[in-house]
Image (cartoon, rainbow, N blue to C red):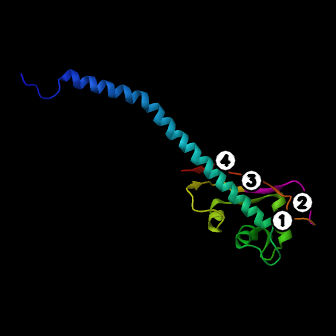
Amino acid sequence: MNRKGFTLVEILAVVVVLAMLMILAFPNIVGLIKGSTGGVDKLNRDHITEAARLFGQEIYLCRAGNIPDGVIEVLGSELGDNFTCREARQRLAIGVEITLDQLTNNGYMSKHKCVAVLPIRIEIEGELNPENWIGTETYKITLPEDLKCN
């Protein structure tokens, strides 16, 4: 008798072996996907924190007559149209709030897939010395609780 093909038992054995392999591999695959998502979320948060720190540095290091447009946009509504760098630094000492869109639109960060209704808060930690503005600042960046990144 010339047999061509597989019997039903052989096909079922192969299906059972493949199902067992899938059962063993599935949790590992799901874990890898979840782990990579968490890593991307941390990278997005780090990127936003760095952009906010850069914005804070621009305020802190601004020179008379050379206030960056992004700083003017964010602080102009509070300090008026003709504020000085000293006033901007004093405002930074008590805290400045900026949105993700303002950071992106003013070139502090690239396009992103993050959403937050609440603003990011930037402030200088420690005492400000009006005579020495450079080199001693430490920034406290508070990301909004509702920040979500895809």
The quarter of the picture where residue 138 lies is: bottom right
27, 79: nearer the viewer: 27
The quarter of the picture where residue 66 lies is: bottom right
Residue that label 2 marks: 128
Rendering coords of residue 57 (x, y %): 77, 63
Q: Is residue 14 left or right of residue 4?
A: right
Report the Cα–Cα distance between label 1 and label 4: 26 Å
Secondary structure under the numbered disc 4 in the rendered image: loop
Which residue is located at x 62 percent, y 67 percent? 105
Q: Is residue 25 left or right of residue 108?
A: left
Report the Cα–Cα distance between label 4 and label 3: 12 Å
| For discs 4 and 2, the disc positioned in front in the rendered view | 2
Residue that label 4 marks: 145
Report the Cα–Cα distance between label 1 and label 2: 9 Å
Rendering coords of residue 146 (x, y %): 63, 48
Return the disc, 2 or 3, that comes first in the chain's sequence.
2
Q: Check if mark 4's residue and mark 2's residue have beta carbons within 8 Å.
A: no
Q: Amino acid at mark 4?
A: Glu
18, 53: nearer the viewer: 18
Return the disc, 4 or 2, that comes first in the chain's sequence.
2
Residue that label 3 marks: 141
**Residue 89 numbered tag:** 1
> Within the magenta stretch, is there residue 4?
no
Q: Check if mark 1's residue and mark 4's residue have beta carbons within 8 Å.
A: no
Task: Specify start and end residues of the magenta stretch as a single range.
Answer: 121-130
Q: Amino acid at mark 3?
A: Ile
**Residue 80 numbered tag:** none
Crowd tier of the residue under label 3, counting other residues whose Cα lies within 10 Å: few below 14, some 14–19, many 20 or above: many
Q: Amino acid at mark 1?
A: Arg
